[in-house]
Image: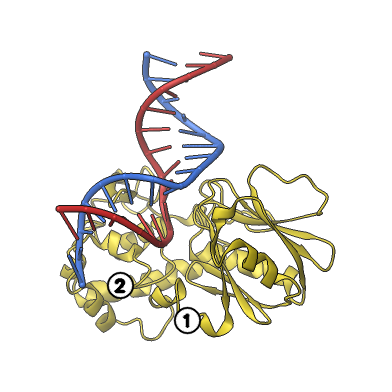
Chain colours: A yellow, B blue, C red
Amino acid sequence: MPELPEVETVKETLKRELLGRVIKGVRIFYPNIIEFPDLETFQRELVDQEIVDLKRRGKWILFELEDYYLLSHLRMEGKYLFRAPEDEVGRHEHVAFLLDDGRELRYHDTRKFGRMHLLKKEELNLRRPLNELGLEPWDEKLTVTYLKEQFQNKKIPIKTALLDQSIIVGIGNIYDDEVLFMSHIRPLTPANSLTKRELQAIIDNTRIVLEKAIHAGGTTIRSYESSEGVHGLFQHELFVHGKETCPICGHDIVKIKVGGRGTYYCPKCQK
DNA sequence: GTGACCACCTGGCCGC
DNA sequence: TGCGGCCAGGTGGTCA
C-alpha cells in the first residue's frame, strides 16, 4: 500500500528511466483507471509528448510533459513495469505507454483502485485532485498553529484526522500508527483535544518517520514494490503497525478499528 | 460543515 | 480439495 515514501521511491526510480523519453502511443485495457479526461482525449493528447520531469505531490506521481501533467495515484497496489510491446499483456496490466526507445511502460494494479488524470499545465493547481490537497510534511507552513486551526472543529480520532489528505498529505495507515506511537498519543484521542506539545510532536515525528522510510526505500507490507521490483526495507523499522509486542516496553500491542482501519498501538507507551 | 457509511476491487486467509 | 465469507485499505460519493 503505497504511502508517501513508496511513491517517492517509485517516482525516483521511474525518473532515471523516463527523462527525455517521448510517448508514442497509449493502450488502455481497463478504462476506469482514467478518471479525466475522456479516453479518446487521454490517448490522443499523450502522443508525441516528451517526459521532461517527474515530480510528486502527496501520494500522486506527476509526469511532467511538454504541455500536460499526467497524474497517477497508485492507491493500494499500483506499480509500474517495463515490458516489450509484444509481451503478453498481464491480467493486472491496465494501461500501457509505448515509449520512443521501443519499451512499454505498463501500469499494473491488482485491485484496479489506481487513478490517472491528464491536466493541461495551467490547470494543475486549479482543479481536482491537486487543488484539494493539504500541506506537504516538510512545508514550513505546517506548524502547531496550522494544525490547531485545522483540528479546532474536529472531534474525530487523531488517527482519522491524520489520514485526511486535505490537511497533511502523504500519511497513510501504516505511518499514521508509527507517528502516533512515537508521539505517545492514543489513536482514538479527539483531534481537537491535542495540546500544542502533542501537535508539535506529531509534526516532528511525521517528518522523522517519512524521511527514514524514504531513505529505506519505503515499506513492503503486502504487495508494494517500486517500478524495478525493488522492495522497501522500512518494515523492519516499524514499531507498532502489524506488531504483537511493543519493542520499547514489551507490552502487548493492541489492535483496534478506527474509522474502519486496522489500527495498532501500545497501551503502555501511548497515554 | 461534519462525520459515518459504502462502493470500488481482488487476493489471501480461515473455517467448514 | 473446494467453497463461501471476511479482511485489507485510499479515496470519492452519498446521506443524515
Callout 2 environment at 10 Å: few (<14), some (14 to 19), or many (20+)?
some
Rendering coords of residue A21 (x, y %): 77, 73
Looking at the picture, tell me which residue is in the foreground, A143 or A86: A86
Find residue A67 and report its image quarter.
Answer: bottom right
Q: Position of residue B5 (x, y in %)?
A: 25, 46
Q: The C terminus of chain A is located in which quarter?
A: bottom left
**Front-lying residue, A51 or A79:** A51
Can residue A73 be seen here? The reply is no
Residue A226 picture quarter: bottom right
Horizontal side of residue A47 vs A175, given as left or right = right
User: Which residue appears at 38% of the width and 68% of the height?
Assistant: A165
Please name whichever residue, A85 or A224, is drawn nearer the observer in this view of the structure: A85
A29 vs A184, left or right, is right
Chain for numbered disc 1: A
- Image x and y of residue B10, in percent: 54, 39
Q: CA distance from mark 2 to mark 1?
A: 30 Å
Q: Which residue is mark 1?
A: A125
Label 2 SS: helix
At label 1, which amino acid type do we have?
A: Asn
- To which residue does mark 2 refer? A201
Considering only order in the chain, which callout, 1 or 2, is on the residue closer to the N terminus?
A: 1
Question: What is the three-letter code of the residue carrying label 2?
Answer: Ala
Residue A212 lies, in percent from the top left, at 50, 67
Pointers 2 and 1 within a single chain = yes
* Front: mark 2 or 1: 1
User: At 35% across and 54% down in the image, what residue appears?
Assistant: A248
* Any part of residue A37 in sight: yes
Q: Give the residue displayed 63% in from the left and 67% down from the top.
A: A42
Q: Chain ID for label 2?
A: A
